[in-house]
Amino acid sequence: MAIKMSNITLITGGARSGKSTFGEKLLKESDGIKGYIATAIPFDDGMKDRIKKHIERRPSNWKTYERPLKISNSIKLISEECDIVILDCITVFLSNIMFEKNYNWEKISREKIDEIEKNIIDEIKKIINNAKLYELNMIIITNEIGSGIVPDNKLSRIYRDIAGRVNQLLSTLSNDVYVTISGLPLKLK
């Protein structure tokens, strides 16, 4: 009997850099039953259009799991139905968690920010640990958002900082890491 091991692949890059397209290509080329963990919430016409385009690109035999929150709680079930999944995307997932409660971001305390970040980091670790525990191969998509100017408002700086630290954690926990630039993937790890 062969030992099955989970593989975690992280794909990062800027907006419209080809991250999802490359991740979907890797998924299509993989063996086994495929799944798609979608984190987006269709809150406006622009997001509804993006979701529609992602759905149209996906093969109909991929199982779709809409999980805007608490992904770690679903990994066992998903692993029973799939061999490999794409999780698209972590940065949308972070914003879902950050906006789950109606905080006053301009007046929020450093302690509350640290608590929110700790909860996010704990959830990310649970996702990866559960994927490894249940031998689920994952392709994780995230945005590289810290390469531009320093944002002029507190919320954007908080989001950028948390996303940057989450991406660093994910790159450490992943077997393979890619960055996409202008549709071209570059393997970093």
Image: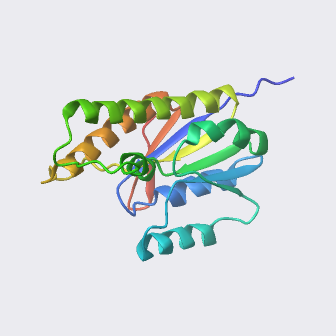
Which residue sits at x=33%, y=31%?
Answer: 115
Which residue sits at x=70%, y=48%?
Answer: 30
Q: What colouring method underlies this structural image?
A: rainbow
Regarding residue 81, the answer to whether it shows in the image is yes
Above or below, 110 against 54 in this view is above
Report the side of 73 relative to 50 (left or right). Answer: right
The image position of residue 119, as x and y in percent, is 41, 32
Report the side of 21 relative to 34 (left or right). Answer: left
Quarter the N terminus occupies? top right
Q: Nearer the viewer, residue 19 or 184?
A: 19
The image position of residue 8, as x and y in percent, is 57, 36
Report the side of 45 relative to 6 (left or right). Answer: left
The image position of residue 137, as x and y in percent, is 65, 38
Which residue sits at x=72%, y=58%?
Answer: 62
The image position of residue 64, as x and y in percent, is 67, 57
Using the rendered view, name the quadrant where residue 28 is placed.
bottom right
Above or below, 138 against 151 in this view is above
Regarding residue 137, the answer to whether it shows in the image is no
